[in-house]
Amino acid sequence: MNIKEDIRPISYIKANAADILAQVNESHRPVYVTQNGEAKAVLLDTESYEKMKKALGLLKLLAQGERDIIDGEFLTQEDFYEVMDHGLDNIGP
């Protein structure tokens, strides 16, 4: 992170919006926007934002998988293949 370039007050953003957007799109680094000395927002290029959304989606799936394992909500490999071959009605004792 280049603090001088990556943290900007809102007044600078207002006066230099096109330049800031160009910087974000070229560097793929976020720009942190401050107001009254406090961080208030983050500007990201669309490509980085989409990658971040996909990564969060994968993390949610992993967390759900872990939760299912903890709760005992899973199939053995044999049962899984049985379901894939014949459907849910053929599983169980």
Image (cartoon, rainbow, N blue to C red):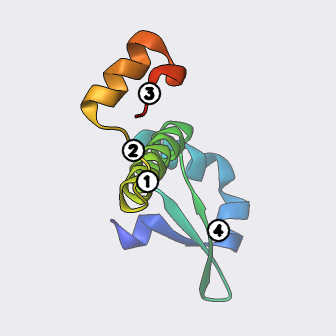
Label located before the other in sequence (4 or 2): 4
* Percent position of residue 65, x then y: 40, 49
How packed mark 3 is, by other alpha carbons closer than 10 Å (few <14, some 14-19, many 20 or more), is few
Label located before the other in sequence (2 or 3): 2
Label at residue 74? 2
Label 2 amino acid? Phe
65 vs 37, nearest the viewer: 65
Label located before the other in sequence (1 or 4): 4
Label at residue 91? 3
Q: Which residue is mark 4?
A: 12
* Percent position of residue 4, x then y: 41, 71
Label located before the other in sequence (1 or 2): 1
Label located before the other in sequence (4 or 3): 4
* Percent position of residue 50, x then y: 53, 39
CB within 8 Å, label 4 to label 3: no
Q: Residue at x 61, y 86 (%)?
A: 38
* Percent position of residue 13, x then y: 66, 63
Q: Which residue is mark 1?
A: 68
66 vs 89, nearest the viewer: 89
Label located before the other in sequence (3 or 1): 1
